[in-house]
Amino acid sequence: DQQVKQNSPSLSVQEGRISILNCDYTNSMFDYFLWYKKYPAEGPTFLISISSIKDKNEDGRFTVFLNKSAKHLSLHIVPSQPGDSAVYFCAAMGYGGSQGNLIFGKGTKLSVKP
Amino acid sequence: GAGVSQSPSNKVTEKGKDVELRCDPISGHTALYWYRQSLGQGLEFLIYFQGNSAPDKSGLPSDRFSAERTGGSVSTLTIQRTQQEDSAVYLCASSFGVKNGYTFGSGTRLTVV
């Protein structure tokens, strides 16, 4: 049973528009969430995180929103750029991010078209 | 080095052979993780080392898989009697506190033929 779900395997967006990547989780013990970005033949790289005490965290063009009651988070990229084309993984863990391992979703492949 | 280094980058092995995959974490990182990504799948947790504590092996898929971390630094993931379903990209990551995110290596692509 998947504890972290990314139901859209792919997403295509026009350059300059907003990209919205969604993630759902089932484990109510999760209290720390991260997004990773992965290019082909490279390891994933950390993008942005959010603690369950917040509902929004922003870093430049990237914003993560957390809806605890719905057990849902989303990553917004605006404006989208062709260099954002990659696979995006949602990840979650408990213990406030202080220990343990991350549980990852299956990823969403984002394509930003010029 | 500045990043997490994994070797080899690619490995092709015959079914039934043993393989060893190596990970050099970032110096000073106390936690080290192994994940694998099979075709079309997400990142599957395998094992986690934190300092001198006993490793969390809960993700290892079978007893053919084992890992060790010597001196709190370099780690080796060993797969005995490899099977075709072991084919995947094996990713190592290290961290000094997850809140800053793991730093992943580029992975080892294992192909069992």
Image: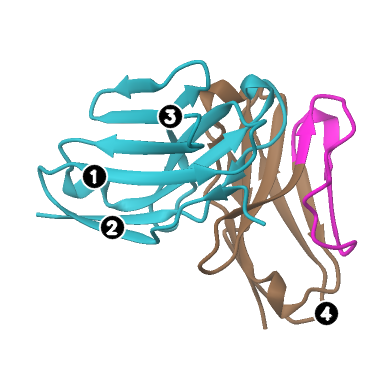
Chain colours: A cyan, B brown
Frontmost of labels 1 and 3 is 3
The Cα atoms of the two marked residues, 4 and 1, are separated by: 45 Å
Disc with the residue nearer the chain's start (3 vs 2): 2
The Cα atoms of the two marked residues, 3 and 2, are separated by: 20 Å
Quarter residue A65 falls in: top left
Magenta residues (range)? B48-74
Q: Is residue B36 magenta?
A: no
Per the rendering, the mark at residue A11 is 2
Quadrant of the rendering where the N terminus of chain A is positioned: bottom right
Judging by the rendered image, the residue that carries numbered circle 4 is B16
Q: Position of residue A46 (x, y in %)?
A: 45, 34
Tell me which amino acid carries mark 3.
Answer: Leu
Tell me which amino acid carries mark 2.
Answer: Leu
The Cα atoms of the two marked residues, 1 and 3, are separated by: 16 Å
Quadrant of the rendering where the C terminus of chain A is positioned: bottom left
Q: Are marks 1 and 3 on the same chain?
A: yes
Judging by the rendered image, the residue that carries numbered circle 1 is A19
Answer yes or no: do the residues labelled 2 and 1 have beta carbons within 8 Å? yes
Would residue B63 be found to the left or right of residue B28 on screen?
Answer: right
Per the rendering, the mark at residue A66 is 3
* Secondary structure under the numbered disc 4 in the rendered image: loop
Disc with the residue nearer the chain's start (2 vs 1): 2
Q: Is residue B57 magenta?
A: yes
